[in-house]
Image (spheres, rainbow, N blue to C red):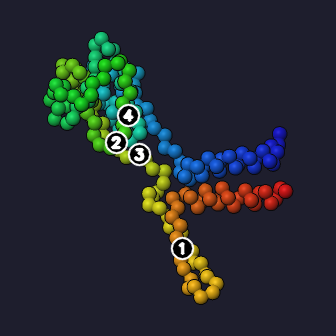
Amino acid sequence: MAVPVRGSLMLMLLLVLISVSAGGRWVVAQVHHVVGDDRGWDSSSDIGAWSSGRIFRVGDNLWFAYSIAQESIVELRSKEELESCDVSNPIRMYTNGLDSVSLDVEGTRYFTSGRPENCKQGLKLNVEVLPQQNTENQQQPMIISTVVEATGPTPSAAASIYLPRGAPSALWVGFVLPFFFLGLYN
């Protein structure tokens, strides 16, 4: 079944509008990490093995699932507190049984059991939060320079337009291509 030309054009324009309104960039998806997978946050879980090889990025979430009758989670300030299982002065305490922790800044975060004996048995997590993964190769804006010839006594001048990477193709698709198709089908 053929799609009418106007329907295809409208679909293409809608996709272009979404792309241009997103600044020509692709949205980076966040990852939800369920700590301990199906076992959750439990002393029988091997949290070290679970976290090994995982990549945590800004925008991701950690989900802690545990029995509130038997467990709680504390976030600590330092590696020393984590290694010594010193839970006396936590940054935050989680006690709901299902807690989501947003990884909103780069750096290292330290989580352990609220019970020092469980911490000493290995129920602790050291998370290195990396920057958001960029789908672009370069963060710096791209510069397009054009020479404009003036008529009359004014000398020629150069104009610069600062566009984010990927914007030239979005502009091409968003503005030039629709006019081409409109000219073909009208």
Question: Could you tell me which quadrant the C terminus lies in?
Answer: bottom right
N-terminal-most mark, 2 or 1: 2
* Whole-number angstrom distance, CA of label 3 to CA of label 1: 33 Å
Count of marks overlaid on the render: 4
Q: Amino acid at mark 1?
A: Ala
**Residue 105: mark in rendering:** 2
* Whole-number angstrom distance, CA of label 2 to CA of label 3: 9 Å
N-terminal-most mark, 4 or 3: 4
Q: Say few, some or many: other residues with alpha carbon within 10 Å of mark 4 (under 14 / 14 to 19 / 20 or more).
A: few
Looking at the image, is mark 2 or mark 1 nearer the viewer?
1
Kindly tell me whether residue 102 is visible in this rendering: yes
Q: Amino acid at mark 2?
A: Val
* Whole-number angstrom distance, CA of label 2 to CA of label 1: 38 Å
Looking at the image, is mark 4 or mark 1 nearer the viewer?
1
Residue in view at x 68 percent, y 46 percent: 14
Tell me which corner region of the image, top left, top right, bottom left or bottom right, holds residue 124: top left
- Do the residues under discs 2 and 3 have CB atoms within 8 angstroms? no
Read off the residue under disc 3. Answer: 132
* Whole-number angstrom distance, CA of label 2 to CA of label 4: 9 Å
